[in-house]
Image: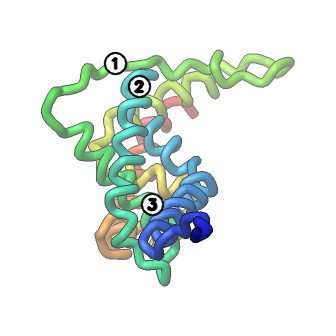
Amino acid sequence: MGQTRPARPDAAMTSSSAHRDAFLAQIERHRKIVLKVVHTYCWTPDDRDDLAQDILAQLWRAYPTYDPARPFPTWMYRVALNVAISWVRGPGARQRVTVPFDADLHDVPGAAPDPVGAERQRVLGQVIQALDPLNRALLLLYLDDHSYRDIAAVLGITETNVATKIGRLKLRIKQDLGHLA
């Protein structure tokens, strides 16, 4: 009788598998973006896990709309920050827990204690925690050395607005840390 041939994946399955593999490769390559966003918006491990899962789910849902002509990290930041901002503002008000910004967590072994540096870190942590979600996202991207153009693309604001907001943030931080000089 007839021989049975091994089943060949149809084009839809191959395309779906390639789509998934491309997505996973990009996520793995740029996973630090999700970690930065999650640590910027959440203070507890459970909240970080929940937000990371929400970000990854939204990235997967939005991936078919990703335009490969644009940089993937910029698109990923935009999705991640939008999810984080919505998450913070969303219903089911997450319990906001303030974690002290202790120098002990960031000390270099063998380094002499720096009380002024520790106080600056504490005040900077308070300033960051007090920022609204948009300014926190702006500061995160700025501290991550993104250009004003990239920041504008991620946040959906103009480069001029980015420059103005960064200038105001720098002034605020300088004023808050000024008394420690």
Query: For the point 47% across and 28% down, which residue is it?
Result: 123
Calculate the distance from the C-alpha at mark 2 to the C-alpha at mark 1.
6 Å
Which residue is the extreme one toward the right? 110
Quadrant showing the N terminus: bottom right
Dot 2 or dot 1, earlier in sequence = 2
The three-letter amino acid code for the residue at tag 3 is Met
Residue assigned mark 1: 97
Looking at marks 3 and 2 on the same chain, the residue that comes earlier in the sequence is marked by 2
Gap in Å between the C-alphas at discs 3 and 2? Answer: 22 Å
In this orientation, does residue 74 appear? no
Where residue 131 sits: x, y (%)? 32, 41
Q: Which quadrant would residue 158 be assigned to in this image?
A: bottom left
Circle nearer the N terminus (1, 3): 3
Residue type (three-letter) at the residue carrying disc 1: Val
Q: Nearer the observer, disc 1 or disc 3?
A: 3
Q: Cβ–Cβ below 8 Å for labels 2 and 1?
A: yes
Give the residue number, with chain letter if any, for mark 3: 76
Which residue is found at the position 78% from the left and 24% from the top? 108
Can you say whether 78 is above or below 55 in the image? below
The residue indicated by pointer 2 is 43
Q: Residues within 10 Å of mark 2 (few under 14, many from 20)?
A: some
- The type of colouring in the image is rainbow
Q: Secondary structure at mark 1?
A: loop
Where residue 50 sits, quadrant-wise, is top left
